C-alpha cells in the first residue's frame, strides 16, 4: 500500500530494544516494553470485535497441546490481514518449487519485476530489496541498472524479509491467482481472495480519482463480491499504458504537496484498507504451527518456508533476547497491525516449547497506532503471549475468549 497508507517500519527493533538498552538502561527498556504491551492489550479488550488473538503450544505434529496455556480470543472473526497474507503466497511458491513446477534459480529481469513497483507504495521495502542484492535505486526507487537480473528465490526472500509488494506481485503472477486460491481454500478456509497489491495501491492513490472516498467505497463493494475488474483495469493501465503510467508516477511524486491531512486522511485510509484480504486468527495459527512443526504440505515445503521466515534480518534481537527460534510475517497499514508467528522461548516456564502466536488488530486510532508502530507493539505483545505472561492472562479472562 502507499507510504502514507502502509507505514512499514519493518521491525526496526533498535527503537524498542537495543538503543534503549544502550541509552537508558535495562530497567527503562522493560518498563517501556510493558507499557507498550499493556496499551495494545487495553485496546484489544476495549475493541474485541476488531481484534483477535490466538496463542498455544503445539507438538511435533503441529497440533495443539492441551497444557492449559491456549488462548482463543475472537479467533474466528475475519479481519484485514495487511501483509500477513504474503505467507499464503510463500506457501504456494514453496509448494511449486518442491514439486518442480518452478525453478528458484530462474533469472528474472529487474525491468519485468519493476513493472509492479509503484513508488511510495511500500515504505521503502522495494529499495531495501534492491539493496539486498547489491543494486542501487534511483530517486523514485527503481533500479538504476535496468539490465540487472535477480532470481525467483531472491524475490521470495524480499517478500518475506522486507515485505516488498512488487516482489509479491511478480510471484503472484508466476504462481497464478488460481493456485494461491487453491492453497488457501485447503489450508486457510476462511481467507478472502488474494489479489495483486498493486491493484489495492492504485485504487487508493489513483490520479484519475484522487482521494475519492466514493470511488474507494464503490471499488470496495465490488471486491467484497469477488469482482476485481476495477483493480485489474488499473493494473493493466499501469503496466501497459506508458502515458497513464507516467501520469500515475507524477501523481505519486506530488503526494506530499496535495495530500489531504489529519482526520480526513485517516478516515480515507481506514476505509481504503478494507479493500485488502481478510482472514481469521485461528486459521493462521494452525498454518504457522504446521509450518513450524514441518508438517505443512510436506517436510520439504515446510523447510523452505522455515528458511525464509526464520532468517528475517531485523528479527535478530527477538532471537537474541527472548527466543531460540522465531519466525513471523507481519502487516502494517493505516490503523492495522497484524502478525502471525511461531516461536520457541529461551527461558521461563515455556522454555524449549513450540508456541504459536497470532495477533490481528484493526481500527487502531492514530495516536495509538503511531506509538505501537514506533515501538513495534505487534512484536512486543507476542513476547508476552508466547510465554503466557501478564497480558495473556488478561485476555484469557475476557468474555471473547473461547475454548478451542
Image (cartoon, grey):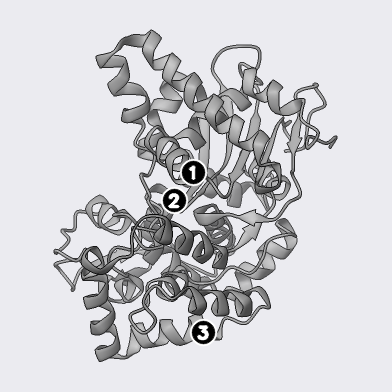
Tag 3 residue:
230
Query: Which residue occupies 50% across, 66% down?
Result: 272
Query: Which residue occupies 55% across, 78% down?
Result: 219
Give the spatial CA distance, label 3 vs label 1: 33 Å
Circle nearer the N terminus (2, 3)? 2
- Image location of residue 193, percent across then percent down: 63, 69
Q: Residue furthest front?
A: 263
Q: Disc 1, disc 2: CB below 8 Å? A: yes
Tag 1 residue:
309
Q: Is disc 1 placed on a helix, strand or loop?
A: helix
Which quarter shows the C terminus?
A: top right
- Image location of residue 42, percent across then percent down: 60, 30
Give the spatial CA distance, label 1 vs label 2: 7 Å
Q: Is disc 2 placed on a helix, strand or loop?
A: helix
Tag 2 residue:
160
Q: In this rendered view, identify the residue nearer to me: 1 or 358.
A: 1
Give the spatial CA distance, label 2 vs label 3: 28 Å
Q: In this rendered view, identify the residue nearer to me: 6 or 240.
A: 6
Amino acid at each position: 500500500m502507499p507510504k502514507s497508507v502502509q507505514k512499514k517500519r519493518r521491525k526496526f527493533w533498535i527503537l524498542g530494544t537495543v538503543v534503549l538498552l544502550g541509552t537508558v538502561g535495562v530497567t527503562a527498556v522493560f518498563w517501556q516494553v510493558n507499557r507498550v504491551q499493556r496499551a495494545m492489550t487495553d485496546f484489544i479488550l476495549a475493541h474485541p470485535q476488531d481484534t483477535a488473538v490466538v496463542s498455544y503450544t503445539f507438538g511435533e505434529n503441529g497440533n495443539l497441546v492441551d497444557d492449559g496455556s491456549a488462548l482463543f480470543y475472537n479467533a474466528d472473526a475475519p479481519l484485514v490481514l495487511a501483509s500477513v497474507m504474503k505467507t499464503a503466497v510463500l506457501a504456494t511458491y514453496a509448494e511449486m518449487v518442491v514439486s518442480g513446477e518452478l525453478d528458484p534459480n530462474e533469472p528474472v529481469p529487474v525491468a519485468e519485476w519493476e513493472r509492479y513497483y509503484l513508488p511510495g507504495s511500500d515504505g521503502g521495502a522495494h529499495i531495501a530489496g534492491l539493496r539486498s542484492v547489491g543494486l542501487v535505486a534511483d530517486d523514485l526507487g527503481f533500479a538504476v541498472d535496468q539490465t540487472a537480473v535477480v532470481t525467483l528465490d531472491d524475490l521470495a526472500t524480499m517478500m518475506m524479509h522486507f515485505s516488498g509488494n512488487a516482489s509479491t506481485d511478480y510471484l503472484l503472477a508466476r504462481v497464478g491467482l488460481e493456485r494461491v486460491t487453491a492453497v488457501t481454500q485447503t489450508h486457510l478456509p476462511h481467507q478472502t481472495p488474494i489479489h495483486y497489491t498493486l491493484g489495492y495501491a492504485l485504487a487508493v492513490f489513483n490520479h484519475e480519482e484522487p482521494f475519492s472516498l466514493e470511488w474507494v467505497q464503490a471499488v470496495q463493494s465490488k471486491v467484497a463480491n469477488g469482482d476485481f475488474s476495477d483493480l485489474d483495469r488499473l493494473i493493466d493501465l499501469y503496466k501497459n499504458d506508458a502515458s497513464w503510467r507516467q501520469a500515475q508516477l507524477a501523481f505519486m511524486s506530488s503526494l506530499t504537496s496535495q495530500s489531504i491531512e489529519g482526520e480526513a486522511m485517516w478516515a480515507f485510509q481506514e476505509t481504503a484498507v478494507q479493500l485488502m484480504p481478510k482472514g481469521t486468527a485461528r486459521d493462521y495459527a494452525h498454518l504457522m504451527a504446521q509450518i513450524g512443526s514441518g508438517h505443512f504440505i510436506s517436510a520439504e515445503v515446510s523447510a523452505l518456508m522455515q528458511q525464509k521466515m526464520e532468517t528475517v534480518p531485523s528479527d535478530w534481537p527477538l532471537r537474541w533476547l527472548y527466543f531460540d527460534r522465531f519466525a513471523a510475517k507481519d502487516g502494517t497499514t493505516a490503523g492495522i497491525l497484524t502478525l502471525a508467528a511461531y516461536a520457541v522461548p529461551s527461558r521461563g516456564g515455556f522454555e524449549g516449547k513450540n508456541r504459536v502466536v497470532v495477533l490481528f488488530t484493526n481500527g487502531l486510532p492514530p495516536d495509538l497506532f503511531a506509538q505501537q508502530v514506533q515501538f513495534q507493539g505487534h512484536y512486543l505483545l507476542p513476547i508476552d503471549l508466547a510465554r503466557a505472561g501478564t497480558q495473556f492472562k488478561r485476555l484469557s479472562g475476557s468474555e471473547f475468549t473461547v475454548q478451542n
